[in-house]
Image (spheres, rainbow, N blue to C red):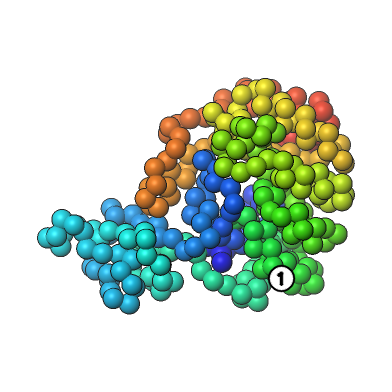
Amino acid sequence: MIFDIQRFSTHDGPGIRTIVFFKGCSLACAWCENPESQSFAPEILYKPSACVGCGACMAAAYGGAMEPSSEGDGSHPPLVRRDRVVPAELASACPSLALRVAGREASAESIIEEALRDEAFFRKSGGGVTLSGGEPLAQGGLAMQVARGLLVRGVDLAIETCLAAPRATLEAFLGLPILWLVDLKHVEGGAFRSGTGGELAPILANLELLAASAARIVLRVPVIPGFNADPASVRAILGYAASLPGSAGRGLDLLPYHDLAAGKYQALGRSYPYPLGAAVDGPTLAELAAFGSSLGLKVSIGG
């Protein structure tokens, strides 16, 4: 199950890349910029203001996923039945693009075929393919098939992960020539659990295993107000990063919080959990970056 394949990206690994977004994640980060990635099932993103009231999405073939408004006079946009199974065909029903379906089944072969459409750009730019999500390791079998299929063709591969996956899944990937873009959200278990709904210890154990394997790793720290943006938390994260095997000169990106995903939450029928406009000021980020650099890390702001 994937929810997007994004071409011509320049922010998820070196060069020009195609990003394969796997659907599903065992964490539920409150600030997630891809909230449509969290569930393993297809979901409807719906923008009523763009609806032209044609009724195409309410056809019987779509299983009642959209139904008439309770206003009843036919002039109001339809409503989403989020308790219904979402048929993939619904994605093509709306002529005004008021709705889309996030989530479709795809074979490893079809993913590889689509990703290789931009192979010429990979070769010229030093780019490649990045598996992202959601959490790609949550579908470890599919991720491995895609990874091996790309690597055997000489495509540079990166995996963007929070490492919230079974240890055995990660072990299967060790030794493959992969660039790991690893989220490091916190190093205090209670705060991590409160913000993500997950357990920190197995994630840090996975990271330590990955670092000990001499894998290529870039750490990515989302700096989130109210979660980890206080200087003490960020300094603790940077200190932990510097203690990992092979940390000297390792890349670490401080990713400032933004609220660009607020519209996605609304389209999913969910409330956005953060106040709009919250931010971490530039001088604080610069000071934290300098601290990380003093520990031997290669720190950048923004990735």
Q: Name the residue: 45% across, 35% down.
A: 274
Residue 117 pos. (x, y %): 63, 72
Question: Position of 245 compared to 185: left or right?
Answer: right
Residue most extreme to the left: 73
Quadrant of the rendered structure where residue 137 is?
bottom right
Q: Secondary structure at mark 1?
A: helix
Q: Across the whole image, how many numbered discs are drawn on residues? A: 1
Residue at (49%, 50%) from the top-left corner? 35
Q: Is residue 296 above or below residue 208?
A: above
The image quadrant that residue 303 belongs to is top right
Residue underneath mark 1? 145
Vertical side of 197 occupied by 24: above or below: below
The x and y percentages for residue 5 are 57, 63
What quarter of the picture does the N terminus occupy? bottom right
Instruction: Give x and y (percent) for residue 127.
Output: 72, 59
Instruction: Residue at 81% x, 49% y: name it.
Output: 210
What type is the residue that disc 1 sits on? Gln
